[in-house]
Image (cartoon, coloured by chain):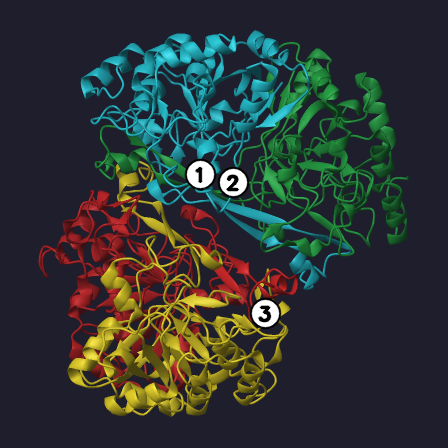
Chain colours: A red, B yellow, C cyan, D green
Amino acid sequence: MAKGQKYDFNQVKKWAEQCSNWGKWGPNDELGTLNYITPEMVRDASRLVKDGKIISLATPFDSQGPQDGRFNRFNPIHLMLASGADAAAGTQDHIPTLRYSDDMIIMPLQCATQWDSLAHIFYDGKMYNGYDMRLVNGSGAQKNSVVNFKDKAVGRGVLLDIPAYKGRKWLDPGEAIYPDDLEGCAAKEGVKVGTGDFLLIRTGQMAMVKATGKWGDYPGGSAPGLSVTAGTWIHQRQIAAMATDTWGTEVIPNETPEVFQPLHMILLVYGGLLIGEIFDLEVLAADCASDGRYEFFFVAPPLTITGAVGSPINPQAIK
Amino acid sequence: MAKGQKYDFNQVKKWAEQCSNWGKWGPNDELGTLNYITPEMVRDASRLVKDGKIISLATPFDSQGPQDGRFNRFNPIHLMLASGADAAAGTQDHIPTLRYSDDMIIMPLQCATQWDSLAHIFYDGKMYNGYDMRLVNGSGAQKNSVVNFKDKAVGRGVLLDIPAYKGRKWLDPGEAIYPDDLEGCAAKEGVKVGTGDFLLIRTGQMAMVKATGKWGDYPGGSAPGLSVTAGTWIHQRQIAAMATDTWGTEVIPNETPEVFQPLHMILLVYGGLLIGEIFDLEVLAADCASDGRYEFFFVAPPLTITGAVGSPINPQAIK
Amino acid sequence: MAKGQKYDFNQVKKWAEQCSNWGKWGPNDELGTLNYITPEMVRDASRLVKDGKIISLATPFDSQGPQDGRFNRFNPIHLMLASGADAAAGTQDHIPTLRYSDDMIIMPLQCATQWDSLAHIFYDGKMYNGYDMRLVNGSGAQKNSVVNFKDKAVGRGVLLDIPAYKGRKWLDPGEAIYPDDLEGCAAKEGVKVGTGDFLLIRTGQMAMVKATGKWGDYPGGSAPGLSVTAGTWIHQRQIAAMATDTWGTEVIPNETPEVFQPLHMILLVYGGLLIGEIFDLEVLAADCASDGRYEFFFVAPPLTITGAVGSPINPQAIK
Amino acid sequence: MAKGQKYDFNQVKKWAEQCSNWGKWGPNDELGTLNYITPEMVRDASRLVKDGKIISLATPFDSQGPQDGRFNRFNPIHLMLASGADAAAGTQDHIPTLRYSDDMIIMPLQCATQWDSLAHIFYDGKMYNGYDMRLVNGSGAQKNSVVNFKDKAVGRGVLLDIPAYKGRKWLDPGEAIYPDDLEGCAAKEGVKVGTGDFLLIRTGQMAMVKATGKWGDYPGGSAPGLSVTAGTWIHQRQIAAMATDTWGTEVIPNETPEVFQPLHMILLVYGGLLIGEIFDLEVLAADCASDGRYEFFFVAPPLTITGAVGSPINPQAIK
């Protein structure tokens, strides 16, 4: 795992097989690593609420970013169906006394802070647990939809603040996070990453784009992120989910010229891991630094959009 | 508060003034009754997690309902930006090895389970705390947007299951819930509704439409719900938020021919109360009936859509 | 061609082969029967303008119809991006002196008056001229898009008013139009249907729904229309395009239980015929009846939406 | 009308009053200068069809341009509701034999080649003929909608190719077209601009952006176009409509710091002139240069979207 080392398709495939959870929870499973979470874990995680402090990890769903059209992802288009301005112009005068506003949204479900479902990524015609990828078609996801997680995205959250661990403001685009970084950071923070955890990994890229005032290459360009070599480490920890403050979790350019986003193949397609992206971890990181507590109660329910392969979310870290 | 009694505009206006919280939390306040929640309440509420059980209160965001075009509200239109079927047709062959799906949504923010923001309802040109309703215009809500609640919709949840209290499966369309019903139900359940609570009131209308298999008049037609006479009772309890399993919270037809949805005027415009609608309380009600515990940790974060006057949500009751 | 007779798959397939134009205009052709139109025909057709009268054949693109969700087709959603009401509320005060409105549309391209492109229908994995149907994917139509017709939908229009010919106000749902009807109607009107024509066939169903005030089963239900036996007659006439005042051109229920919309297979997939639907022929029919001239200059350009498989249109009959 | 001269608000207002057609066609008029067109003119214009040649003046309605978010205008979002790829994945196997595709569009009605309706621009709270601008609200345009033109956008087209007249490929951004240029160009081309004409004015900006391969500042930035001093010349010609190959018809930066787009105030609000924008005049200009005929039959019907303030179009020049 030397810096800058490249890995070929066969190595990725080998890791994918090592990290496979296909069949582990039965042939009909659509929950993947969320199966690791037990009710006891949820209850214990709720005890991490010490101060009653609530921190939102969502970025604004806004016409100004972060998308720029790559992968056909556009920014949210927020429109009014009725407004106070309209009411003032008399459009609601048929309604007795009350006036109201209503609004609507047009947006990719992956445009800002989001969960990827297990129907989001395919390899060799298959998605998690071996389902045919053609079950994700114009009618939505017939298997592995994000709706399966409607009452599952609750548990213990752990933040690994990698740039803080390295004494920096942010990692640079293209800079990889290796297993040693994850281990070292957890040790420094005094937390242990384990079964059923929601692991939040801060790269600082969100801080960087805020500092520059421009999203720039954020949506799909060069980015800090996990090295493909971190796959087995994550798999072995038996975490329930993972999320970062980047567009795509993984270091870009990928270390695997033959495979785009190899950890998505290893951990999502084979491992069945719930992956979150475009989280804003800035306020949480500052808070954890100030009180020294890097674990918290984590609640991030997806919307129940029938057949959806992703969901916009407003994750809550409650301390 | 006799059954079937009607009230005129002046009575509604009088109640509204009695329930007004304008200025209570300062002239710039946009949080309303969510101000009642203290960190201590959040922490204490988290201790209601006894079993680690998670219950989603969201209906499906689905093309099949419940909207029928009234108030220009349509059902969600879920569309694929990329799919497994497309990938199988070769559209992603320029990507090395990985394949993916992406999707998008077009939907009114009030189409299914939702929060109304304090920018959703106006009276006499004003919204909560006296802001001009024209601040809600084609650019969205400049004041009282639902985004203000991004880290505020967490606390103690209490369910009042009115039909269960009355020994029935559901209340009938047009049947009103009076303060005595709320008091009696709470007493029977052994809970006390108080400051900072998220009060969930089950009318059973969701059970009724499920039983018939048709939404019918659900979106805006005749419905069970709160009597306008319950306004002051709710105001005095100092609850943080209220939600029901109906389209509009209030009994329809309203008891006030001169005012459409009078409690929205009294409690939302004047009281600054967060109101939730189209909650699915069926699973929760059954669970509360079985373990006798009608209180729980409640987390229902809105999406952070800039300027939004409402938000789709997936509320979580954690017991 | 007895009334009520049914035809099996093999018969449809046989007709399709008889009516095939695959390869007729080369292996790369995407125009189909529009190839029949010569510049001379366009010039001659323009001489049919005698009075300078212009008749629009478009129905309203409106939230009130005709779609009802069948085939995932919804009615247009027309939204304001800026309005006079907004301007009055001050949202444009940063602009010197001028104020403006802007709007947008969300609509299926097949929701009202429309052209079907040659990419709209497939049989056995193929579309017109043998192109693989998977070339119509999430990226749009790579072949046979309606954009090919951007400067081709101009020529001689001919109206066959079948109910007028039969002395009735409209044909009934389920009532078929046979070749004899087409011949008889043309003879009565004194027109000859021939090479390069835009053939408009009135069934009267639009008149019927207007009379009842409800779209009812119009979008996909029982309807008057062409008998499958009319396929070869139409093919032999070498017309450029055909359009009706119905949702689907063909009589519904189809006479072919094994093939849905068999003329679409025979004439569009195999014949390469441009087909128009949901035309409002009422004003035109009245005008033709009054002046006895059933031919006119016809101009119905599609929008140039890249990759579109259909297009909303406002066809113009100019007499 | 010296190059670079600026004009103040009072001068613009004076011109507007001189060019006013308010009340000219009655207090209820919503057609404006389209009233100039008589049936005889339509018939005579049809005689300009000499060769049967059809030229489309529409740009692609495409995700790649020209909009960039200014004025909240985004590029078309074209989506498939059903596709051949889907059909291949089995989603239509419940349909006997036939397979199909369907698509939809999300787009501003002003995103590419378009008509501005008389409800598009306001001054001092009014639109053309004195209607209150608040009649254009969340319910669309109650007056002056583009739908009024559904059978009116047909007549004699005339092209003035200004850069060709000046012996250049295109005018530069910020370069104004004065009445002398219009007169001189018409004289050189041997055409006379007169009552009821559809006047197409080529600036060459479309050629410039095609040459650079980038839309750049096209949507709302610096542009060649009409000088405000051309207003009275155009008014006096009694043309029916005017269109250019630019985003906004007028020279930008405007010559009137106190009034944005002053000709829109003078000619559209006061004159009731139909204005078209983002026309692609390149093929037409080359054709006119080659045959020396700068007049033609012009047909550009708007879509009949209820309440629309603009319409995408595919204008046809037929020679």
* Mark 1 or 2, nearer chain start: 2
Q: Nearer the viewer, residue A308 or A191?
A: A308
Q: Nearer the viewer, residue A183 or C206?
A: C206
Residue D284 falls left or right of residue D74 = right
Q: Amino acid at mark 1?
A: Cys
- Label 2: chain letter: C
Name the residue carrying label 2.
C61
Q: Amino acid at mark 2?
A: Phe
C-alpha distance separating marks 3 and 1: 35 Å
Q: Position of residue D144 (x, y in %)?
A: 68, 44
Callouts 1 and 2 close, C-beta under 8 Å? yes
- Label 1: chain letter: C
- Label 3: chain letter: B
Q: Position of residue A304 (x, y in %)?
A: 31, 61
Callouts 2 and 3 close, C-beta under 8 Å? no
Q: Secondary structure at mark 1?
A: loop
Mark sitting on residue C111: 1
Q: Position of residue A106 (x, y in %)?
A: 45, 54
- Can marks 1 and 2 be said to lie on one chain? yes
Callouts 3 and 1 close, C-beta under 8 Å? no
Residue B68 falls left or right of residue D28 = left
Q: Is residue A123 above or below residue D224?
A: below
Name the residue carrying label 3.
B142
Q: Residues within 10 Å of mark 2 (few under 14, many from 20)?
A: many
Q: Secondary structure at mark 3?
A: loop
**Quadrant where the C terminus of chain D is found in the figure:** top right
Q: Amino acid at mark 3?
A: Gln
Residue C73 seen by the camera: yes
Q: Is residue C58 above or below residue A185?
A: above
C-alpha distance separating marks 1 and 2: 8 Å
Instruction: Give the residue at the far front of this rendering.
Output: C167
C-alpha distance separating marks 2 and 3: 32 Å
